[in-house]
Image (cartoon, grey):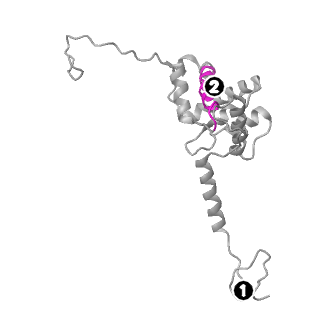
Amino acid sequence: MSIYDVATSDQDLPDVEEPAWREVSDIGVAAARVEWAGAARELLLVAAKKYQSLVQLKDLAVGVQEQTGIRTKQLPKLWIGGTLAEVYAENLRRGEPMLPALCVNPDESVFEGYAAIVGAATGETPADPDAHASHERLAAYRHFEAGNLPSDGGSAMIPAKLGAARARARKAAIAERPIKACPKCNLQTPASGICDTCD
């Protein structure tokens, strides 16, 4: 029989087992969160061992459900924050950098709730969550001895996609600033407000 032959009804086909999924509604949110947090920690540790590696929020959400066999129909943004808060609490207990800083949105910004998790744990909410996360990521890469960490120890960096978006926003903001012109000659005046041509 060729691999291209169609199996007939009298031939036995191997049974393919579906994973035995458990629903959050059956085991409870708290129990699910504990198991998800353990799986999330393992996935984030893999990223922490490779310099400048990040984990997309959606990939983490899928990964923790697959690893634990616990699924939910809720959107990840509704439950992943609580899971990542558990991961951070474990990081604090172990004296480790914040592994959830490695988890990002598709635009490479930190996930919604990042600043709140930091604020709840430390008492200080970062003014710029993405800048805070960049320092936490670097600390994680160093702590977990990332394989391709530069010999100088690396540096805290905003991810490329987010950095480019921020640069575009700054340029747009500069372009929208009103231009002050001299009322006599209509040339742009310097920051002093005094026209070099007329005054």
- Where disc 1 sits, the SS reads loop
Range of magenta residues:
34-51
Q: Which residue is mark 1?
A: 183
Q: Is residue 13 magenta?
A: no
User: Which mark is on residue 64?
Assistant: none
Percent across and percent down for residue 57 are 57, 35
**Callout 1, which amino acid?**
Pro
Look at the image and tell me in which quarter the C terminus lies.
bottom right
**Which residue is found at the position 67% from the left and 36% from the top?**
149
Q: Give how far apart the Cα atoms at labels 2 and 1 are.
A: 63 Å
Which of the two residues, 82 or 158, is positioned nearer the viewer here? Answer: 158
Q: Which residue is mark 2?
A: 41
- Where disc 2 sits, the SS reads helix
The local crowd at label 1, few if under 14, some if 14 to 19, many if 20 or more residues have their Cα within 10 Å, is few
Q: What is the quadrant of residue 177 in the picture?
A: bottom right
**Callout 2, which amino acid?**
Arg
Cβ–Cβ under 8 Å for marks 2 and 1: no
The local crowd at label 2, few if under 14, some if 14 to 19, many if 20 or more residues have their Cα within 10 Å, is many
**Which residue is found at the position 19% from the left and 10% from the top?**
10
